[in-house]
Every structure is written in structure tokens, then in C-alpha cells.
């Protein structure tokens, strides 16, 4: 049975695309399952003028667009909990109106003072909003109430700006009240990494540099920048994907087993892993990271001729790199990462490549057998969820030859349909106060320190862009990066 949670939500950027496409449908899923029921209210804010009825009509449309029936009493009851208030986040006088509305709704729905503030808007306003929420009295008081602040990325654009932002937030909220949301941490198979490792002796006993040759993380996007061009050109793949999504996935793969499955213990181990991540000097950063920018093909324009992109842009749309951990578990085992836009397909996967046997007894001189293939454990994150384990087995013909075979598990269609969306999971965690699947400030800071060094080196060089063809797997330099170590990417086109 679902446990009903009580809270008044206040969404800054409440009429934005993210709110309509993801956040409100996710709240509706929680409502249908009973995690929200009678004791909640939602306030949406933006600069636009709108009344409650028009806002509720927009909410219904967002539910319909996400595949929900909206002609039911359940949908109508859910939407009745929504309210709208136009708001200027830079005008302190406007917060008094929000305070009165929150107090009124708290009493009406008996939310018991529990409040969630969700910031889904331009990040330059995050610090101002957090400050005014406190100084203007919107935070409820008492030992048995909670105030929680949820922040969308980006959390800064480098370590210095992230630290200033964190300092500003910390004046109003404690660290355990701040939820830095990363929707990748809400994905089913990313959360399954912990179950795979710490729930299986067979896996965890081999999860170290004695048995694993390398680990590969690929986040591939098929589309270009589209309507995000203005934001993306000021960010690039390194900041947009590596600093947050990839570093979070890598920390889950590299961490030690926590003392207990609690948010504090899990975060502590992720921080230890990131602390041991080698921050490269200038020469090593230039050697171990490559960047790319897509060119044109047929009707597809190159990145520099996309709408709202400067024609001389040096923003990277692709990154590949090698990460090294200087600790007992991973010393000598590289983690290879790559991500980019306009690649061959849209998918996210982790490939764990195990070391080959020290002696291949099947490759004796008279044998026509090919060398044994490496065992590979693949975690499919999206679009399909599941695992695959590549082993070596005997072929079923005469003589004695071996071939790689795969043991596959893919989540079936019904289970996929029933799997909660990432934002649904994460909003549920916010309601519970569970920070397991959110980035702590130490995690963010170590990730930025690593990424900043790569960025500094790249800023010293003029890149030769464009350097990869759309619908490929990136520039030739990404292949050269891994081939230098006498390795290859597990996922390759046409393999």
C-alpha cells in the first residue's frame, strides 16, 4: 500500500515545458497510486497573467499529451488541487502574495506545514529565490515540518560559480534540504547498478581491477541541438552531459559498498570515489580527452548553421575521455566515457569488459580457433532496459572451437509500461526526504574540479571543427583514444 504524503508544492517556472511534459504528469502518477491524495496542493508561478481555471486547463492538456485520460473524476479531482499566481522572482513584494496563498492552501488541505519548492527556471535566479523564500517568511517553522528545495541543472557552469550558488542556497537551506535533481538517477537501470553489484556475490567479488579490464559508459543522442541551441552553445557536451549525468553513473560504478543502504552512506561512498578520480595535468588532459562537433550531411546542417548557433562556434557536441581512479580497487583500470549529439542512435549503456584468461588453452598451435573473446557485462539503460552477459562456449560442430554467446535479460513490454518515469521516482523521493538519488554538494564539487581542468586545456586550443559526420559514433579521435591502449569500444556501428 502506498503511503500518502502531505505537502504544498510551489513551482517556479510552473508554466515551462519541463513542468507540463514531465513534472505534472509525474505528480498525477503519484496521485493515482495514492502517494498523493487529499492533503496536497500545487502552486504554479511565472510572469504570465493567468487565472486558476486557465492553469488547470493547461494541466489537463499536459496529462492528455502524456497519454492519460482526462475525462475521469480522478483527473478532475487531481487538477482541482492546482493554483496559479503570477510572480516576479526579483520583486520581494511578490513573495508576500505567495506566502499568503501557501498559508491558505496549507490550512485548506491540512498539509501540516510541509513545503516543497521546485526551481525550474533560469539558474541565475536560484540564489535570489532561496534567499527571499527565507527572508519573506515562506519557510514553515516547527520540529515536525519540512521545507525542501529542488533544483534543476545546471548547478553552476564551473566550480567557482557552483560554489557561489551553493553558498547562496546554504544561507536559507541545510544540505539535507537541498535536492539537486538529475533525471538519469531516476532511471530504472541506473538504480539497478546498486542491486547488481551489492545484491550478487558473483558480481561484486569480481568488481575490481584484478578481473575487470575496463568499463565503458556511452550516452548517445541521435538528434541535434534543436530548440536548445541557445542554452547548449553556452554549455557544450562536457558541461551538459559529462559533469552531471556521466559523473554520477561513474561514481555508482566505482564506489565501495556502503555500510547500509541509506542516502548518507551511499553519498559518502560516491564522494570517496570521486575524490580518488585523477585530476589531469595539462598534458594528460589533452591526451585523455577528445572533443568533436558534427558537420553536415544531406539535408542536415552542420552545428554551426543550426538556428541560434554562431557560425564560428567552438562548442563541442561530442566528448570522449578516459578516467582513472587512484585507489586500491581501480588502480590501472580505465573508465572510458563518450557522449554526443547527432550520433548513430539514441541509447545509454554501460559495458564492463573483463580480463581474458591469462592462458588461452584453446589456442594451441594446431588449432584453427580464434582467441577467446573477453567476457562483457552490458547494462542497457535506454531505450530498452536489461542486462547482457557475453561468455565463451563451445560451438556445436565437430572438433573443438569456441565462440562468444550472450545471456540476455530484457525487461518485457508490460514491465516497461509499469515502470515509473524518472521524475515520478524522484518527486516521490523528495516527498519522502530520501536523498539517495540526488547529487550532494561534495559530489558536484569534485565533478566540477575534474571537468574544469579539461575545459581549461581546451580553451587554450583552437579546435578543428567540424570533425565528425552525423549518424556516426563521433570523430576518429575517439577511436584513436581507446586504440592507443590496445582496446576498442564494445558498441561499434554494425557490430
Image (cartoon, helix red, strand yellow):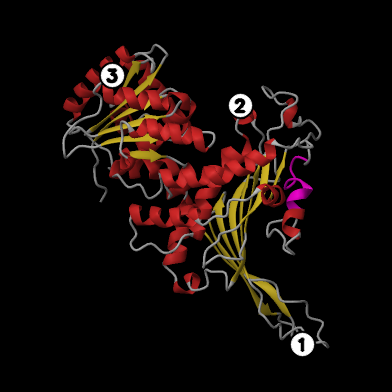
* Residue at position x 38%, y 23% in the image: 128
Residue 5, given in percent of the width and then of the height, sits at 25, 40
Nearer mark to the viewer, of 3 and 2: 3
Residue 309 sits in which quadrant? Answer: top right
Placement of 252 over or under 102, stated as above or below:
below
Left/right placement of residue 125 relative to residue 492 reads left
Placement of 413 over or under 302, stated as above or below:
below
Q: CA distance from mark 2 to mark 1?
A: 59 Å
N-terminal-most mark, 1 or 3? 3
Nearer mark to the viewer, of 2 and 1: 2
- Label 1 sits on residue: 399
- Label 2 sits on residue: 227
Left/right placement of residue 219 relative to residue 256 reads right
Front residue (pair 388, 91): 91
- Label 3 sits on residue: 98
Left/right placement of residue 67 relative to residue 307 reads left
Callout 2 crowding tier (Cα within 10 Å): few <14, some 14–19, many ≥20:
few
N-terminal-most mark, 2 or 1? 2
Front residue (pair 378, 398): 378
Callout 3 crowding tier (Cα within 10 Å): few <14, some 14–19, many ≥20:
many
* Residue at position x 58%, y 43% in the image: 451
Instruction: For the C terminus, give its image quadrant.
Output: bottom right
Classify mark 1: helix, strand or loop: loop
Residue 465, given in percent of the width and then of the height, sits at 78, 35
* Residue at position x 63%, y 35% in the image: 236
User: What stretch of residues is rendered in magenta?
Assistant: 469-479
* Residue at position x 28%, y 19% in the image: 98
Q: CA distance from mark 1 to mark 3?
A: 79 Å
Left/right placement of residue 291 relative to residue 434 reads right
Residue 307 at least partly seen = yes
CB atoms of marks 1 and 3 within 8 Å: no
> Main SS type for the magenta part?
loop
Amino acid at each position: 500500500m502506498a503511503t500518502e504524503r502531505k505537502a504544498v508544492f510551489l513551482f517556479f517556472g510552473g508554466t515551462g515545458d519541463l513542468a507540463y511534459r514531465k513534472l505534472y504528469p509525474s505528480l498525477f502518477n503519484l496521485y493515482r497510486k495514492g502517494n498523493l491524495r487529499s492533503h496536497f496542493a500545487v502552486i504554479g508561478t511565472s510572469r504570465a497573467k493567468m487565472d486558476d481555471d486557465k492553469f488547470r486547463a493547461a494541466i489537463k492538456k499536459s496529462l492528455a499529451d502524456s497519454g492519460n485520460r482526462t475525462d475521469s473524476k480522478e483527473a478532475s479531482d487531481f487538477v482541482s488541487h492546482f493554483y496559479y499566481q503570477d510572480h516576479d522572482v526579483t520583486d520581494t513584494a511578490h513573495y508576500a502574495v505567495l506566502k499568503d496563498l501557501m498559508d491558505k492552501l496549507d490550512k485548506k488541505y491540512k498539509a501540516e506545514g510541509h513545503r516543497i519548492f521546485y526551481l525550474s527556471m533560469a539558474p541565475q535566479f536560484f540564489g535570489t529565490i532561496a534567499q527571499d523564500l527565507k527572508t519573506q517568511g515562506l519557510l514553515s517553522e516547527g520540529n515536525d515540518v519540512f521545507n525542501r528545495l529542488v533544483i534543476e541543472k545546471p548547478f553552476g557552469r564551473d566550480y567557482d560559480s557552483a560554489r557561489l550558488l551553493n553558498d547562496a542556497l546554504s544561507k536559507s537551506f541545510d544540505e539535507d534540504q537541498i535536492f539537486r535533481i538529475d533525471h538519469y538517477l531516476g532511471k530504472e537501470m541506473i538504480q539497478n547498478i546498486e542491486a547488481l553489484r551489492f545484491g550478487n556475490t558473483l558480481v561484486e567479488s569480481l568488481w575490481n581491477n584484478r578481473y575487470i579490464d575496463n568499463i565503458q559508459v556511452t550516452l548517445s543522442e541521435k538528434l541535434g541541438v534543436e530548440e536548445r541551441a541557445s542554452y547548449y552553445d553556452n554549455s557544450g557536451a562536457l558541461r551538459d552531459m559529462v559533469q552531471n549525468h556521466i559523473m554520477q553513473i561513474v561514481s555508482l560504478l566505482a564506489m565501495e559498498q556502503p555500510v547500509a543502504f541509506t542516502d548518507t552512506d551511499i553519498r559518502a561512498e560516491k564522494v570517496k570515489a570521486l575524490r580518488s578520480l585523477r585530476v589531469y595535468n595539462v598534458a594528460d588532459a589533452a591526451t585523455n580527452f577528445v572533443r568533436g562537433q558534427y558537420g553536415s550531411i544531406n539535408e542536415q546542417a552542420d552545428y554551426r548553421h543550426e538556428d541560434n548557433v554562431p557560425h564560428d562556434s567552438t562548442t563541442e557536441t561530442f566528448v570522449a575521455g578516459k578516467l582513472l581512479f587512484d585507489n586500491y580497487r581501480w588502480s590501472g583500470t580505465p573508465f572510458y566515457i563518450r557522449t554526443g549529439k547527432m550520433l548513430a542512435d539514441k541509447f545509454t549503456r554501460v559495458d564492463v569488459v573483463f580480463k581474458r584468461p591469462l592462458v588461452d588453452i584453446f589456442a594451441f598451435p594446431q588449432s584453427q580457433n580464434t582467441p577467446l573473446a573477453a567476457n562483457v557485462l552490458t547494462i542497457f539503460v535506454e531505450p530498452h532496459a536489461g542486462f547482457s552477459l557475453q561468455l565463451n562456449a563451445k560451438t556445436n560442430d565437430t572438433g573443438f572451437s569456441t565462440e562468444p554467446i550472450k545471456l540476455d535479460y530484457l525487461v518485457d513490454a508490460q514491465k516497461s509500461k509499469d515502470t515509473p518515469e524518472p521524475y515520478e521516482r524522484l518527486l516521490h523521493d523528495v516527498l519522502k526526504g530520501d536523498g539517495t538519488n540526488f547529487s550532494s554538494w561534495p559530489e558536484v564539487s569534485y565533478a566540477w574540479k575534474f571537468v574544469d581542468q579539461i575545459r581549461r586545456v581546451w580553451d587554450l586550443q583552437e579546435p578543428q571543427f567540424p570533425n565528425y559526420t552525423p549518424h556516426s559514433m563521433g570523430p576518429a579521435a575517439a577511436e584513436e583514444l581507446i586504440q592507443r591502449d590496445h582496446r576498442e569500444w564494445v558498441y561499434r556501428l554494425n557490430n
